[in-house]
Amino acid sequence: MGILHVINHPMITHKLTIMRKTETGSKDFRQLLDEISMLMGYELTRDIPLEEVEIDTPVAHMTAKMISGKKMAIVPILRAGLGMVDGLLSLVPVAKVGHIGLYRDPRTHLPVEYYCKLPADIEDRLVIVVDPMLATGGSASDAITMLKKRGVTNIRLMCLVGAPEGAKKIQEDHPDVDIYIAAMDDHLNEHAYIVPGLGDAGDRLFGTK
Ligand code: PRP
Ligand code: URA
């Protein structure tokens, strides 16, 4: 089963609390999501393998270490996932970015696909799927399935706030995928919104409501 990593860092928790507040506007919401994404990315990449390289400093020759192996791709689930891309790119500027468009049908709460554009060599990359909200888990699970159909074998899911229902679904549907979240909230309400959550992440990010 994939590991559920709840990243309990005071800087992240503090910023998330400001994001949750009803009175926090889009400008601050966007900036905080960007900052948290960078901090979470730091934890998510903690176990990435290094390889030895031979270099010359101005003083001496040395055997040093650099990140080895797989290249990375960031795949935001539209729309709200877009708010997590720049923070990760500030850590890994050479990562490619793919986009998966899914919206939740307000009646059934099931994801509907409307867009998919991925880097040509996506199957050779470590893919970080990003979306602030892991509610029922339907959107993230479908996005991961779309990536697997394209041959991707190395996937991590990074969300801001999770619900137990969503984490369970990912662990059942995709036991090979580790999940990284900043907080595990209590439950889903009758509209499948996370409680206490932060409301509609896409609307708050883009000021559409
Ligand atoms: C939200 C959120 C996730 C999804 C989570 O997107 O950004 O993609 O819901 O819910 P789930 O885990 O139950 O699938 P939404 O459908 O509101 O689209 P938006 O990002 O365009 O606002
Ligand atoms: N999507 C959101 O944006 N928020 C939730 O709480 C659930 C799904």
Image: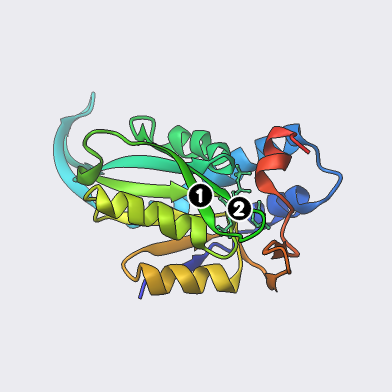
Q: Residue furthest front?
A: 107
The percent position of residue 135, horizontal first and vertical second, equals 60, 62
The residue depicted at 41 percent of the width and 52 percent of the height is 143
Residue wearing tag 1? 112
The residue depicted at 54 percent of the width and 67 percent of the height is 166
The percent position of residue 134, horizontal first and vertical second, equals 56, 60
Q: Is residue 24 visible?
A: yes
Q: Is residue 154 left or right of residue 137?
A: left
The percent position of residue 179, horizontal first and vertical second, equals 45, 63
Q: Is residue 46 visible?
A: no
Q: Secondary structure at mark 1?
A: strand
Q: Is residue 57 left or right of residue 204?
A: left
Q: Secondary structure at mark 2?
A: loop
The percent position of residue 147, horizontal first and vertical second, equals 32, 50
Residue 36's place in the image compared with 139, above or below, is: above
N-terminal of the two: label 1 or label 2? 2
Residue wearing tag 2? 105
Residue 172's place in the image compared with 74, above or below, is: below
Q: Is residue 23 left or right of residue 178?
A: right
Residue type indicated by callout 2: Asp
Q: How far apart are the two marked residues, 1 and 2, measured between alpha carbons?
A: 7 Å
Q: Report whether the residue tagged 1 is closer than 8 Å to ligand 1.
A: no
The residue depicted at 57 percent of the width and 39 percent of the height is 79
Q: Return the residue nearer the eye: 187 or 85.
A: 187
Q: Are marks 1 and 2 in contact (CB under 8 Å)?
A: yes
Q: Return the residue nearer the eye: 33 or 8.
A: 33
Residue type indicated by callout 1: Val
Q: Tag count in the figure?
A: 2
- Where, by quadrant of the figure, is residue 185 drawn? bottom right
Q: Is residue 19 left or right of residue 77?
A: right
Quadrant of the image containing the N terminus: bottom left
Q: Report whether the residue tagged 2 is closer than 8 Å to ligand 1.
A: no
